[in-house]
Amino acid sequence: MPEPRDQLAPLTAADAGAVSALARTVWQATYPTLISQAQIDAMLADRYAPQRIRDQLDDPRHAWRVARQGAALVGFAHGVRDDSGCKLDKLYVHPAQQRRGVGAALLREIEAWARAQQAARLWLQVNRGNAQAVRAYAKYGFKIVESRVFDIGGGFVMDDHVMEKAL
């Protein structure tokens, strides 16, 4: 469980830059052995540009949540509603704060949002080589339903498991 001083809240536009910076910290700790630095840089630039994040805050199909310890942003999650349910699109916790319940608390926030959207399932994509994340999602009830390579353009692919959980 998160410590009592932890706070979970919706993301505000003022925190978009902090989310972008935290994403870079987590990705640099996680992905260099799984994908190239060029792909890391391209995906961070595309998916974590502060303006893109701020634009999503005004779209009711998107839900952003952040976790803080004191004033520090230590984690974030992003859900998006689609035709097949809701997708857990992003869930990242600062490496120094992992395995302390922050990710589980953020996941519960996105699950609650997905239920409020009347979604029957929550799904996600996770890099096949990210064994720690695959184990964590399985611990919280997600099952692998498909494994495939997704072409994301620019000569890059994502080699992912698709996991889902009934809500």
Image (spheres, rainbow, N blue to C red):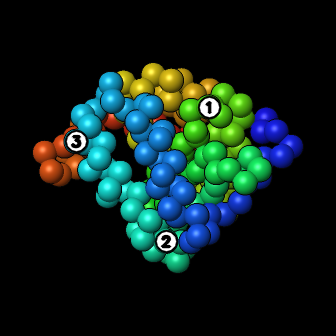
Query: Of helix, strand and loop, which one carries label 2?
Result: helix
Residue 131 vertical placement versus 142 (above, below): above
Judging by the rendered image, the residue that carries numbered circle 3 is 38
Locate residue 60 relative to residue 128 in the image: left or right.
Answer: right
Q: How many marks?
A: 3
Residue 96 - label: 1
Distance between mark 2 and mark 3 Cα atoms:
25 Å
Horizontal placement of 119 versus 54: left or right?
right
Task: Judge whether 123 appears above or below 9 on screen.
Answer: above
- Of all residues, the one furthest to the right in this rendering is 4
Q: Which residue is mark 2?
A: 54
Question: Residue 160 in the image: x percent, y percent?
Answer: 34, 35
Residue 80 makes an appearance in the image: yes
- Dot 1 or dot 2, earlier in sequence: 2
Which residue, as the protein is rendered here, is positioned at the far left? 155
Q: Quick one: label 2 or label 3, which is nearer the N terminus?
A: 3
Specify whether residue 90 is in view. Answer: no
Q: Position of residue 114 (x, y in %)?
A: 61, 57
Q: What is the C-alpha distance between the residues marked 1 and 2?
A: 26 Å
Compare residues 150 and 84 and report the one nearer the observer.
150
Label 1: few (<14), some (14–19) or many (≥20) C-alpha neighbours in 10 Å: few
| Identity, as a three-letter code, of the amino acid under mark 3 | Ala
Query: Between marks 3 and 1, how big is the CA–CA gap?
Result: 25 Å
Crowd around label 3: few <14 · some 14–19 · many ≥20 (10 Å) = few
Mark 1 or 2: the one toward you: 1
Q: Are marks 1 and 2 in contact (CB under 8 Å)?
A: no
Q: Toward which corner of the image does residue 99 lie, by quadrant?
A: top right
Mark 3: which secondary structure? helix
> Could you tell me the amino acid type at mark 2?
Arg
Residue 115, quarter of the rendered image: bottom right
Q: Residue at x 71, y 31 (%)?
A: 100
Question: Residue 2: which disc?
Answer: none
